[in-house]
Amino acid sequence: MNNGTDFRAILRAGTPIIDVRAPVEFQQGAVPTAINLPLMNDDERASVGTCYKRQGAEAALKLGHSLVRGELRQHRIDAWLAAFQLYPNAYLCCARGGQRSHISQQWLREAGLDVPLIVGGYKSLRQATMSITEEKVKKPIVLIGGCTGNGKTLLVKAHASGIDLEGLAHHRGSSFGRTLQPQLSQASFENALAVELLRTGSERWVLEDEGHMIGANHLPECLRERMAQSPIVVVEDPFEIRLERLREEYFTTMHQDFLQAFGEEKGWQEYSDYLHHGLFAIRRRLGLQRFAELTDKLDTALVEQQRTGSTESHFSWLRPLVIEYYDPMYSYQLSKKAQKIVFRGDYAEVAAWLTE
């Protein structure tokens, strides 16, 4: 049995990791293939931590064993056994490769299963992902820019060396950007990015021209600095084609996603709230009067969509929103980067340029 020290090989292979840290620790940061099956829950961990501070390691260990015993202990062992049956090549992992993973390993051994540990625990994996990102972003980067609806994300996803930052962040980067997947913690987002860079393994990266924030996640500083120096190719598709892409993404797909996740009635309410929230988030920039006018048009469009299934009426508020708000904002941002633009063209021309 080999314990895990080749962190890059483990991350590159997408090896499952049974993470026995408490849920609160797991939520603060984990690697993409980790499955949280804790040795102790949050309350148990807190009690043991307090005991450790007041009475030392021996008393804390004794308390831990008294809190997780009998049926509860067996229940947790059974969960690990089931996970290792499903993922025979998995590793055990705790915070630093200390007591918790060794105790879990010992209990499994007593149950007849010998499993390897991640040496140094999650802390070692985290250090590995940070060094991977710092190393990989030194390669050349090409940014895809352009106003909303130009298919920048589609171009990134279609390219062999494309890294979909918005996909990794579970957010499309605008006020309407949230998806049905909750955003990851900052550390988990950075870990996912590192693994994507490692597994894609390109000589250069194709990325979307993002701000430093994507929803609640921010780009690692080393990547942000590299992007600030990188050339930009700008996609410029006809306005009507852009509107059709936005219709598909925000009205057709999001509506279907909400219905699938929540059912007919609640799904419709969630979808309606999502669109209202997107508009509300930029009310001050629109001006309160314009915000009220566009909200009225949104309400009318939602009534029409619910009655007929048609999304056509949404153009009554989307068209002015793009013309008056999104396009001027992005054009201004792009004007400050004018010296870095190396190519402009429509979707097909930019795709061809990137391939060359």
Image (tube, rainbow, N blue to C red):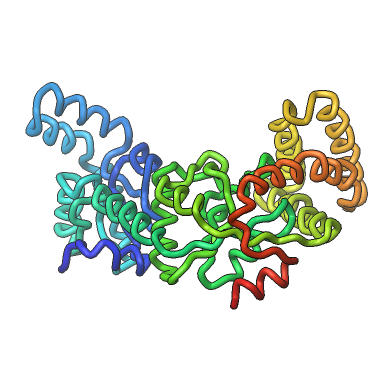
Seen at 79% across and 26% down, the residue is: 287
Q: Position of residue 239 (x, y in %)?
A: 83, 56
Q: Residue furthest front?
A: 339
Q: Is residue 6 left or right of residue 288?
A: left
Q: Position of residue 159 (x, y in %)?
A: 57, 70
Q: Is residue 86 visible?
A: no
Seen at 74% across and 28% down, the residue is: 283
Figure disc tally: 0
Q: Residue furthest top?
A: 54
Q: Is residue 280 left or right of residue 233?
A: right
Q: Is residue 178 visible?
A: yes
Q: Position of residue 347 (x, y in %)?
A: 72, 67
Q: Is residue 31 above or below residue 218?
A: below
Q: Is residue 39 above or below residue 132?
A: above
Seen at 16% across and 46% down, the residue is: 98
Give whichever of 238, 319 is nearer the camera: 238
Seen at 32% across and 66% down, the residue is: 85
Determine the image quadrant of residue 284: top right
Quarter of the figure that contains the N terminus: bottom left
Give whichever of 285, 267 is nearer the camera: 285
Give whichever of 344, 30 is nearer the camera: 344
Q: Residue furthest bottom?
A: 356
Q: Position of residue 178 (x, y in %)?
A: 63, 44
Determine the image quadrant of residue 125: bottom left
Determine the image quadrant of residue 149: bottom right
Quarter of the figure that contains the C terminus: bottom right
